[in-house]
Amino acid sequence: MVRFIIAAVLILGLAACQTEEPPVVSLSSQNFNDTRIAKTLFGAAPTGSPQAPQPFGSYSRGCQAGAEQLEETGPTWQAMRLSRNRNWAQPETLDYVRDLSRFAATQPGWAGLYIGDMSQPRGGPMLTGHASHQTGLDIDVWMLPPQRLDLTVAERESISSISMRRNAGAFTNDLWTPQHEAIVRAAASDPRTARIFIFPGAKVAMCNSATGDRSWLSKVRPWWGHHYHFHVRLNCPAGAAGCTNQAPPPPGDGCAEAQDWVDRILNPPPPDPNAPPPTPRAELTMANLPGQCQAVLNAQ
C-alpha cells in the first residue's frame, strides 16, 4: 500500500505521565479512517507481539512491537501491581531497569527497586491512568525503599508506595533521603535517559544540594503528581526509525524553572474569570496512531 505521511498535532498536558510531547507524530494512511478506540484494543492484548522489538510513534501516541516482560522478581528489583500486566517494555528499557536497580541496591536501606507501570504488552493507550507509557520506553520507579525482594503477588497488590511531598509538592517531606537523590541522579546521568519527571519540591531540593557536575539536573523535570514515584523516560533506541523522540530539555539546569513551579504552588495566581473551560480529552482512535500499530495488534 502506498503510504503518505500526515502531521497530527499533539495535545499537551493531558494527564500525569504524558508531559512535554513533541509537536507532531507521523501517521500512516494504513489506519487513516479507523475510528476504533485504541485503548480498548491495546488494553485487551495479553502478550507481546511476535515481532522484532521496535517502538513506534511518540510516548503518548504509539505502540511497541516485540516487547519483553520484566521478570516479576530479579536480584535487585520486583515488579509491582502484576494484575495490571504493565511490566512490558523494549529490551533496552529492561536493561536500564536492571542497571538502575543494581545501583539502588548499593544505597543504605535499599535492597533494590520496586518497579511500577511500564507499558502494556503491545504498548498503546491504556484503559486507565497514563496518557504516555505507550512505546515501552517509560518506567515508574516507586519512592518506597525496598526492604525485601520476596513480596508475594498478593503483597504487591496491597502495599503502597510512600509520598515524598509536603505543602502540595512545594517541598520534600522527612521521608526524602540522600539515597533518593542519589538514585534519581544515577537515573538522570544515564545517557539512555531523556527525562525524569518528579514533583517540583524534589527538583528544587536536588538543585540546592547537588555538588560537582550539575548537568544531570537538566533532565529532571518538575511535573504534577510524581511524588509516590518518579517517572523515567528513555530516548528512542538507536536505529528505531519509527520512534519519535522529544526535543531535548532546555539549556541549563532547569532550577529556576523548578523554583517558579514552587512559587506558584505557594502563591497561586488568582483564577482568570475569562478562562475557557478545559477541553475534554478525546479518546485516541487507531487513526491517531502510527500505521505500524495495526500490524502490532494483528501479529500472532
Image: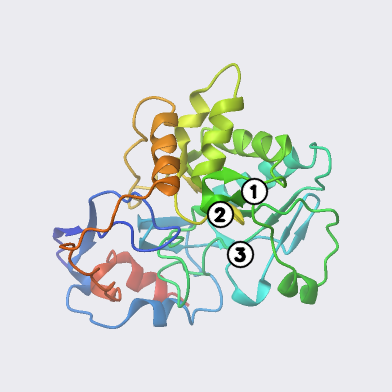
Q: Position of residue 158 (x, y in %)?
A: 74, 74
Disc 3, SS: loop
At label 1, the amino acid type is: Val
How dense is the environment of label 1, judged by Cα within 10 Å: few (below 14), some, or many (20 and up)?
Answer: many
The residue that appears at 28% across and 75% down in the rendered structure is 286
Disc 2, SS: strand
Depth order, front residue of 123/230: 230
How dense is the environment of label 3, judged by Cα within 10 Å: few (below 14), some, or many (20 and up)?
Answer: many
Disc nearer the start of the sequence (3/2) = 3
Where is the N terminus found, in terms of image quarters? Answer: bottom left
Disc nearer the start of the sequence (3/1) = 3
Disc nearer the start of the sequence (2/1) = 1
Q: Position of residue 147 (x, y in %)?
A: 84, 53
**Mark carried by residue 139:** 2
- Report the Cα–Cα distance between label 3 and label 1: 11 Å
Disc 1, SS: helix
**Mark carried by residue 97:** 1
